[in-house]
Image (spheres, helix red, strand yellow):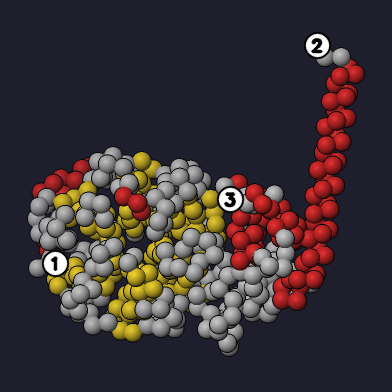
Amino acid sequence: MALVAGLLGLQAVVVGARAAQSNRGGTVALAFDQASQTLFKARADAVYRSGDGGRHWAPVELPPASAPRTITAIAVSAGGNGALYVAGPGIGVLRSDDGGRNWSARKEGLPGTDVAAFATHADRPETIYAYVNGNGIYRSEDGGQHWRLMDAGPRGGITRFVHSNMPGSMQSGWLFVAGPQGVRRAMDCFCGWRDAGELGRAVDAVAYDPGQPHNVYAATDAGLFFSTDGGEKWSLLNTPGTPIEALIVTPGGTLYAAGADGSLFRRSGAANRWERMDA
Amino acid sequence: MHSPITCWSFVLVLAAATARGQDRAGDSIEAGRRIYAAQCAACHGLRGEGQPDWDRANAAGELPAPPHDSEGHTWKHSDAMLYHLVRDGWRDPYNKTQRLTMPAFGQTLAPGEIHDVIEYLKTMWTPDQTRFQQEESRQAPFPPEAR
């Protein structure tokens, strides 16, 4: 409890501070709320928000932890209802409907709190997915009030995943998974996992462009790869030097990439160059 | 207070209705089995076993026909989705040929026949799979024309 209070106190000190000062340690996840034009980032132990594209950050307070916890995912629901989710081992799934002031655990039907990855549906505000280590992928269609095991997940496990509304699915979209063996994808009916191209290396983060859903990005230790055909063929993008650990593409087409050293870059579709946001 | 005769009449009516329902379900499955043998078995196998290596694209870039039995993923789809897949067909967006991945049968089979063949597919699943599919179908049942 004292440790949590200390962390919250530290967060209060850095309100309004530049990212370079507030973001010690790597960013593990990024999310973007289109309605409020808010960018969120998570480290393993904290969540921050920015209303100016990542130049300035303010902490988002989480409920006190009663056990060790590690944030692995943050996500915003589709459709502008503003629901914000935080997930990870020791956390399970937390949801806030007021921008992070109040949180509720969404655990009915989940086998535990060891949530390794989490994603929101691209179009359906109340549909969310959680990958629980050793169990598989669970889906909730009521914002996490009830969960249901849908699939064991791809072989090799899941590091991160994202739901995409790329056309062609038998159901309502696709899941693109970043894992130890590359990117794998499945329709959201969970009708079989297939390799997305032949990256042949571990992928730390995956993202897609909501405005052009065939455009998919994959971050690896060899750089950031880009596909324009839903993950069939990949090409290496010119990227900042730091290894990329988290990715998000806004509905407007701006790609944000967070480095393992806490740095943040963005690249808009129009300008084919990276802009460092935290420097 | 109901008389014993009234109660027994109700039980008999209920039993008759249940029997009629079971007969109809049995008729539907039997009709579906015949349609399956004529229209589906050539690709999906006589016992719903699918084609070899169905879970990866072949050399032409097409997905082979998947099994419909408990080894496949048919049981993960709602009644509505299965109906539309059979009626309209489906094209895998990664299919490198010009063919549909799943041909459309809307010009070949009547809505009731599509319903029947789906009811037959359900006989190939485990009880857990059947329960899962029933849950999926709760919000996505057969469309009115196929009920």
Q: Quadrant of residue B109?
A: bottom right
Say which amino acid is labelled 2. Answer: Met
Between A96 and A155, the one lying in front of the other is: A96
> Circle 2 is placed at which residue position?
B1
> Circle 1 is placed at which residue position?
A277
Residue B75, horizontal then vertical, whole percent? 65, 59
Assign a secondary structure to mark 3: loop
Same-chain check, marks 3 and 1: no
Assign a secondary structure to mark 2: loop
Q: Nearer the viewer, mark 2 or mark 1?
A: 2
Between A266 and B87, the one lying in front of the other is: B87
Residue shown at 34% from the left, 59% from the top: A72
Residue A236, horizontal then vertical, whole percent? 30, 84
Residue shown at 70% from the left, 49% from the top: B147
Q: Can residue A77 be seen? A: no
Seen in the picture, residue B5 relative to A259 is either above or below; the reply is above
Say which amino acid is labelled 1. Answer: Met
Same-chain check, marks 2 and 1: no
Distance between mark 2 and mark 1 Cα atoms: 80 Å
Residue shown at 62% from the left, 72% from the top: B102
Residue A27, horizontal then vertical, whole percent? 25, 63
| Residue at the outermost right position | B5
> Circle 3 is placed at which residue position?
B140
Q: Quadrant of the N terminus of chain A?
A: top left
* Residue A74 appears left or right of B1: left
* Residue A6 appears left or right of B57: left
